[in-house]
Image (cartoon, rainbow, N blue to C red):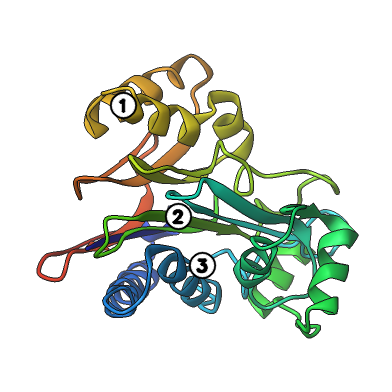
Amino acid sequence: MKIIIHGGFFSESSTNAATKIAKQKALSEIVRSGYLYLENHSALETVVYTVSLLEDNELFNAGIGSQIQSDGKIRMSASIMDGSTLKMSGVINIEDVKNPVFVAQKLLDYEDKVLGGSGATAFARKKGFEVFSTEIPQRKAEYEAKLSGNRQGTVGCVALDKDGKLAVATSTGGKGFEMVGRISDSATVAGNYANTFCGVSLTGVGEDIVSGAVAAKIVTRVTDGFSLKDAFAKTFDELQPIDGFAGAIAIDKDGTIFHQDSHPTMVFASFDGAKEEVFG
């Protein structure tokens, strides 16, 4: 059993010692909680649970603490993918829910598996998700001051369970001050993808990630026989002509854990029951 999580890109980690320590502590606690959950649950159940913990922590830009868009509203996106069934579900630009990843999970049982905007929000209400504001004072102050900074915020989780099944979940609160209607990579196969060979979750600039079809490329290459390291290397090399801003975490069917970023500020944590790695 293996699990790896990421908390997005966060430039302040290198300049604000207190924030860096807080994020490292949170990542450590969440990855261990996720692993304990994984001991008695499937990979799919675990990635949903673990991403919900990240959504509930205002240090990360997903769920509570999500960025505010140019019109003053918060719109979030999230998706999950079951590597064994190849089913993916997600929500795009959903509003006023605490945990978008739980709404994405509900959609897995429906024929129409990815909903956007008002349709996603209406589905959430129909399924009993109460109105919940994820705005925090910090994000409001940033919006009012029109300070977008360099936070490329997304959270994600990849898990390999005791039965050898892989799953992935990714959630984002957006980049902040974006044009209304902008779609991130998080609920696409560019930012969130898994099959029986590999699972990958992305963070960074959504437009770059979509242009590079990053998650799908990595998984496809591993499926075709590349090692995880070589699949990452080739895919990230292909981002260089556009100076693509991306970071990715992954686990393959053999339990190999790998991560890479193009601009080294991604924060992540992994745990295999014995060894923990935390970077931020």
**Picture coordinates of residue 74, whole percent (x, y):** 77, 65
Circles 3 and 2: CB atoms closer than 8 Å: no
Identify the element where label 1 is drawn: helix
Q: Amino acid at mark 3?
A: Phe
Mark in front: 3 vs 1? 1
User: Split into 4 quadrants, where in the image is the N terminus?
Assistant: bottom left
Residue type (three-letter) at the residue carrying disc 2:
Val
* Residue 183 higher or lower than 280, as above or below: above
Point out residue 245 in the picture as x, y percentages from the top left corner. 49, 34
**Are the residues at dot 3 and dot 1 in contact (C-beta closer than 8 Å)?**
no
Q: How far, Cα to Cα, is label 3 from label 2?
A: 18 Å
Q: Is residue 31 left or right of residue 47?
A: left
Q: Which quadrant of the rendered structure holds the C terminus?
A: bottom left
What residue is disc 2 on?
A: 168
Front residue of 93/25: it is: 93
Residue 228: image x %, image y %?
26, 34
Residue 231, which numbered label? 1
- Identity of the residue furthest to the left in this view: 274
- Of residues 59 and 133, the one nearer the viewer is 133
The residue shown at (64%, 33%) is 207
Left or right relative to 278: residue 166: right
